[in-house]
Amino acid sequence: MTTILSTPKKWPAILLPESRPSKAAIAADPAAALDAAVKAGAFDGLKRAVHDLGPTGVIATVAASGLRGRGGAGFPTGEKWRRTAETDAPRRYLVANGYGADPAAATDRTLIEENPFGVVEGVAIGAFAIGAREAFIAVRSDATEAIRRLEAVIAAAEDVGFIGPGMLGVGPGAGVTITVRPVQGAYMLGEETVLLKALEGKRGQPEQRPPYPSEVGLFDMPTAVQNVQTLAAVPWILVNGAEKFAAIGSKASPGTILVGVRGPGGDGVAEVPLGTPLRDIVGLVDGVTGLKAVLVGGPSGGLLPPDLLGTAYDFEALRDVGAHIGSGSVVAADQRACVVDLARLLTRFCADEACGKTIPCRIGTRRISEIGDRIATGLPRPTDLQLLTDLSADIVASALCDHERLATLPYASGMRYFRGELDEHILRSTCPAGVCRPIAVAAGAAH
């Protein structure tokens, strides 16, 4: 069970509002939970979209709010919807990505379990805005509780006419049908074109872009693919206004985002305003003392030193220091951790999860992993660091998808900020943390 971390009262609650019905209430009686949610404001955004704004007004409002995709890339949501809506086609689709590819991050699953009404309402609004009559919510097949929550809420909302063929009285043929699609796959399903292939029952491999899914997506039709967090923020924007949303967080990245925070003393999920310093996010969990590094962005994230804890948690600031938002994961490592071993573990995971479509990914990431194995076991070659640098540059330059580009980050950031620890392994066959073996353990190591 995921812990919802306590946050400062001044931080707004958009994705996880305090007034949301409890998980127990939804499980016991979805219809009664829906009534309670409606009294607290659920589906007010959808009503305003359908009765007041219309599709173009919804897109304009979302664009004015500055909402960006929460799936990691941070593409402007309003612009994606506009492109999808303007592409001429017999039908369009909206796909909500709630798969949560990072095995250590529970942000998407937590949102679905805690606020399924917000997710379903956001999906309905997004589909209405782009002119889609069908929408799919992709969820991990083993996230059974999340699937049950969504299906119960969708059924209850259809019974009262909030969604479905006659959504809020818009007339036959103008409503939105929402389907939950359990999918099973690998880390690559976080990439939008891979997810679309999986939904079509095909092998999960990325596609060359352009054309983008907004032009050629699910079943070769225009498709807007959005993370569930992105969609769950839309009802709040329509009810409270684009200006109010834009005033939250940073100027370039407004709003809030769910972050999975993990430290030696505990872990949990918190709703955090974008632009919040990493120091404040790490401080949400107990037991973080003697900090050595912070992993930001999941398995393909960057390893940052303590003196960068003042970095703002937003798309541009993290990219500038060699990390990224990615899966929304922030992991604090103390002095017992070995950066070389941690980078090796992360790179091996990325290599194992590669789909194998391109040579730089299939072979390049494996070679980086092998170099890491040599360094960690005291058998490095004199040219390994230069080879690591050159190979990473080649992979980034020729990558087909972000998995390849970002898989190089653990070692790239390790060389940038923790070169001394790498040199200890390579030049002296010593692990300062006492983790890597069979090479020597440094005197005074924590282990």
Image (cartoon, grey):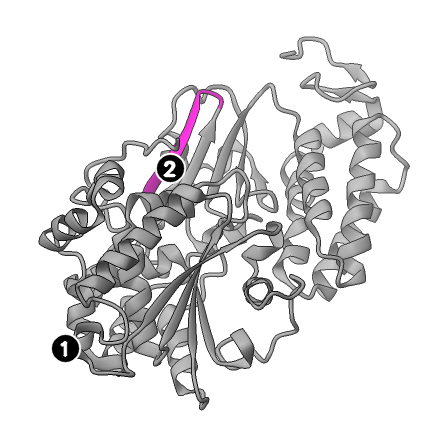
Residue 114 on image: x %, y %: 30, 43
Seen from this angle, which residue lies furthest top? 444
Residue 68 on image: x %, y %: 38, 63
Identify the residue shown where x is 26% and y is 45%: 16
Identify the residue shown where x is 27% and y is 81%: 174
Q: Label 1: which residue?
A: 51
Q: Quadrant of the C terminus?
A: top right
Identify the residue shown where x is 87% and y is 33%: 380
Identify the residue shown where x is 44% and y is 20%: 265
**Is residue 247 among what the camera can see?**
no
Q: Which mark is residue 269?
A: 2
Q: Which mark is residue 414?
A: none
Residue 329 on image: x %, y %: 48, 41
Asked if residue 402 is positioned above or below residue 426 in the image, the reply reads below
- The quadrant in which residue 283 appears is top left
Q: Mark 1 belongs to which amino acid?
A: His
Asked if residue 108 is positioned above or below residue 85 in the image, the reply reads above
**Secondary structure of residue under mark 2:** strand
Magenta span has 253? no
- The quadrant in which residue 239 appears is bottom left
Counting other residues with Cα less than 10 Å from the Cα at mark 2, is it few (<14), some (14-19), or many (20 or more)?
many
* Residues rendered magenta in the picture: 264-271
Q: Mark 2 belongs to which amino acid?
A: Val
